[in-house]
Amino acid sequence: MNPVTLLPFIVLIGAMFLMTRSAKKKQAAAAAMRNEMQPGTGVRTIGGMYATVKELHDDTVLLEVAPGVHAIYAKNAIGAVLDDAEYNRIVHGDTPELDVDGAVVPDDASSLTGLDDAESDDAKTDLVKKTDSDKGDEDEAKAEDEKKSDGKADGEADAK
């Protein structure tokens, strides 16, 4: 046989070996996670239910799904073992305390200027650079505004 014809089979066998190896690693990690369960630990089942471990047996686990409500589950039905902080955050809605030792970022830029409110009103700047032609346009616009304000509203025509 030609080695070129055997190459696809070798690649296929190698790929299958790598896939089964990674699946076995995942199964071993899941088994180790389930073995670290202890009474009082918070868990999530594969169905998405959060509960607290009450008792451990060989193949089963007694879970407290609500205060005073117990259910027996297979150990394989445990999807994740949660640490106390995460379990309390999800089940009881506890929010962790925020660390505010660092700098507090303001929600506006007024505190960045270093001026108080009275000074900041006077210190407002126009960010658009004006040229001489712009100043002439402003004077014309003011003159038009004064003409409009002679008692006529916008859109009114002179009556004859």
Image: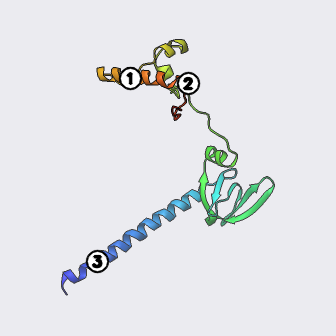
Q: Is residue 118 above or below residue 158?
A: above
User: Which residue has dot 1 on it?
Assistant: 140
Determine the residue positioned at 24% across, 82% down: 6
Quick one: SS at disc 3?
A: helix
- Across and down, in percent, residue 94 comes to 67, 41
Quick one: SS at disc 1?
A: helix
Q: Quadrant of residue 101?
A: top right
Gap in Å between the C-alphas at discs 1 and 3?
Answer: 86 Å
Closest to the camera, between mark 1 and mark 3, is 1
Q: Is residue 94 above or below residue 123?
A: below
Residues 49 and 20: in front is 49
Q: Evaluate if marks 1 and 2 touch, with contact meaning CB atoms under 8 Å apart.
A: no
Q: Amino acid at mark 2?
A: Gly
User: How packed is label 1: few (under 14 Cα within 10 Å), some, or many (20 or more)?
Assistant: few
User: Mark 1 or mark 3, which has the lower sequence index?
Assistant: 3
Gap in Å between the C-alphas at discs 2 and 3?
Answer: 95 Å
Gap in Å between the C-alphas at discs 1 and 2?
Answer: 19 Å
Determine the residue positioned at 81% across, 55% down: 68
Closest to the camera, between mark 1 and mark 2, is 2
Q: Amino acid at mark 1?
A: Glu
Q: Is residue 85 above or below residue 121?
A: below
Which labelled disc corresponds to residue 151? 2
Residues 89 and 54: in front is 89
User: How packed is label 2: few (under 14 Cα within 10 Å), some, or many (20 or more)?
Assistant: few
